[in-house]
Image (spheres, grey):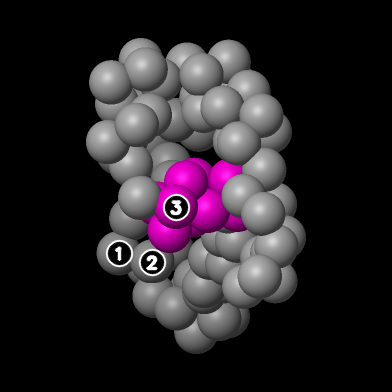
Amino acid sequence: MTKPHSNAPIPWSALMAFGLTRMRLSPETFWALSLAEVRVMATPPAPLRLAMPGRAELEALAQRYPDGERHGRG
């Protein structure tokens, strides 16, 4: 949902359809939300950016937790 101009009318039909059908909010919960809260709920989440371990960290983990017979493998 894009941010409307400050003088644009509030698109109540779209907001109600989003909140009541897509988000499955009860009417009481929907009407208790602020427009800012609805906007946050309608914004797609940012993709998760997981830190990838470097080679040195992987080698340290491999030494700390070796595979093999000791762990029932191999």
Asked whether, in this view, residue 49 is left or right of residue 27, the answer is: right
Instruction: Determine the CA span between mark 2 and mark 1.
Output: 5 Å
Circle 3: residue type: Leu
Q: Earlier in the sequence, mark 1 or mark 3?
A: 3
Residue 31 position within the rendered picture, expressed as x and y whole percent measured from the top left: 34, 31
Which of the 4 image quadrants contains residue 7?
Answer: bottom right
Start and end of the magenta stretch? 35-44
Which amino acid lies under the numbered mark 1 shown in the image of this protein?
Answer: Arg
Principal SS element in the magenta part?
A: helix
Q: Are marks 2 and 1 in contact (CB under 8 Å)?
A: yes
Q: Residue at x 39, y 75 (%)?
A: 60
Residue that numbered label 2 is attached to: 61
Q: Position of residue 55 (x, y in %)?
A: 58, 80
In the image, 15 versus 22, the foreground residue is: 15
Residue at image location 43% in from the left, 58% down from the top: 36
Q: Is residue 47 visible?
A: no
Lateral position of residue 25 relative to residue 12, left or right: left
Which structural element holds mark 2?
helix
Q: Is residue 32 above or below residue 66?
A: above
**Residue position for label 1:** 64
Q: Nearer the viewer, residue 64 or 46?
A: 46
Residue 47 placement, left or right of 38 = right
Q: Are marks 1 and 3 in contact (CB under 8 Å)?
A: no
Judge left or right: residue 34 versus residue 35: left
Q: Is residue 62 above or below residue 56?
A: above
- Seen in the picture, residue 54 relative to 24 is either above or below; the reply is below
In three-dimensional space, the C-alpha distance between marks 1 and 3, rounded to whole angstroms, equals: 51 Å
Q: Which residue is mark 3?
A: 35
40 inside magenta stretch: yes
Tag 3's secondary structure?
A: helix
Name the residue rendered at 44%, 52% in the picture.
35
